[in-house]
Amino acid sequence: MAEYEAVIGLETHIQLNTVTKIFCSCKADSWMDPPNTNICPVCTGLPGVLPVLNKAVVEKGVLLAQAMHAQLRELSYFDRKNYFYPDLPKGYQISQYDMSLAVGGYLDLPMPQGYMRRVSITKLHLEEDAGKTKNEYGRRLIDFNRCGVPLVEMVTGPDLRSADEAAQYLIRLRQLLRWLGVSEGDMEKAHLRCDANVSVRPKGADYLNPKTEIKNVNSIDAVRNAIQTEIARQVREVEAGRRVEAWTLEWDEDSATLRKMRSKETEADYRYFREPDLLPVRLDEDWKQAILAGFPELPLERRARFIEQYGLPEYDAEILTAERSLSDYYEAAVRAYGGDPKRVSNWMMNEVLRMLNERGLAAGQMKLKPAYLAEILKLVDAGTINMPTGKALLVKVEESGLAPGQIVEAEGLAKVSDEEPIRAACREMLAENPKEVGTYRGGKVTLMGWFVGQVMRKMRGKADPNVVRSVLEELLK
Ligand code: ZN
Ligand code: MN
């Protein structure tokens, strides 16, 4: 049997997290609002109204384009994309066609298998969203709330070679959107929508076969499953000597199957022409500089730098750069600590991340500031507190917002190495457990661990266990 490879391109629609819509002052994010409560004459296309471009949409689009290594156009235009559909009250969508905000670009995907896949970007433009229709009560209902919600449409070249790579693209894109603060990138809330173009060909071939387009995939897992299912179907078709036809397919999440929606329309059907009601967007040097001032180091660059500068394993660097606030936190803690960066990483990946997950917080929201984490590490290093006390202290700082040193003092958490109180506690414990003492003296020396535990408990964990052990050994002789 011949070997096949998949050829996949993704078309994504990204909702920008601006306060208002792209051409009117309606609220942009109406995810929770009742249908048709967040609309006005502009976004519902009533006669006689004029759109006004929201500056913030351009600014967020510029940030995204820059992060995709795309080339920004100094002059870009809006166009009308004409089609009829009930959720599009104007009869056209305001989009950008041949002179869009940016040209080209790419995104690198470090694959878990160890290789890097570079995905080219063939389209990046601004546009408005349409409304939404749904079937209910035996009728077709329309909700215009999403009309005019600002989007970036971004299309990749046919560069992805597996369902896993497609999923990875969405994971990295979502990471980037959040990193830049331009979108929440939440697929379940339609902040990020994805259609996938899929074809197969003999492995290594350089031509493209007819592709199908998969629509209605609203989670990263669904994208992976739908593409896997479609690749398998196309291979079966080709093996059976049949042609793959250029259908549009709809993914049904519940049955995990693809259904044929329609035969594909082509771009020419849209009769694009310039939007006469909007001025061109002039992104002059000053404005561009102002938008890009403070443009952040991107996730992959930071990941590479963490490996290089702090000697972190790739695994640590990947986790610590998953979110921008987490990576900022890590660096601030390393700086405040001044010791081994790997030690800070260990505490973050174990203790701090668990705390963040349990409490549903982002790193930047914690009361346990990076300087406090560093202080706790220093207290442990100096032997002022022991490791379990240090870990418990993280939680106490997070709950109180007090400095670690303050809590250590107020609660008397400092490790007791002083022999006198330890000796007293040991005597007391031995007196309370005559039976175990007898057993120990009879030869069952493994009881020592239990004795040490009892004394530690008496001293609320503060005693130095090594001192406890040596005192006990002496007393039991
Ligand atoms: Zn409106
Ligand atoms: Mn679009």
Image: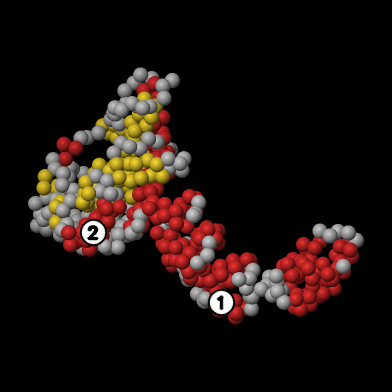
Amino acid marked by disc 2? Glu
Could you say where residue 234 lies in the image, as x and y percent from the top left? 37, 28
Residue placed at 72% from the left, 67% from the top? 465
Residue 261 shows up from this direction:
no
Could you say where residue 18 lies in the image, as x and y percent from the top left? 27, 60
Crowding near the residue tagged with mark 2, few <14, some 14–19, many ≥20 C-alpha atoms within 10 Å: some
Amino acid marked by disc 1? Gly
Indicate if the residue with disc 2 has its beta carbon within 8 Å of ligand 1. no
Q: State the mark number for residue 92.
A: none
Residue with the most extreme top position: 241
Crowding near the residue tagged with mark 1, few <14, some 14–19, many ≥20 C-alpha atoms within 10 Å: some
In front of the other: 322 or 79 = 322
Residue placed at 21% from the left, 44% from the top? 85
Residue where numbered disc 1 is placed: 405
Q: On the picture, is 46 further left or further right than 323?
A: left
Residue placed at 75% from the left, 70% from the top? 468
Residue placed at 17% from the left, 59% from the top? 285
The alpha-carbon separation of the residues under discs 1 and 2 comes to 44 Å
**SS at circle 1:** helix
Q: In the image, which is nearer the foreground, mark 1 or mark 2?
A: 1
Residue 208 shows up from this direction:
yes
Q: Is residue 308 above or below residue 236?
A: below
Could you say where residue 439 lies in the image, as x and y percent from the top left? 88, 62
User: In the picture, which quadrant includes the C terminus?
Assistant: bottom right
Residue where numbered disc 2 is placed: 59
Q: Is residue 122 above or below residue 34?
A: above
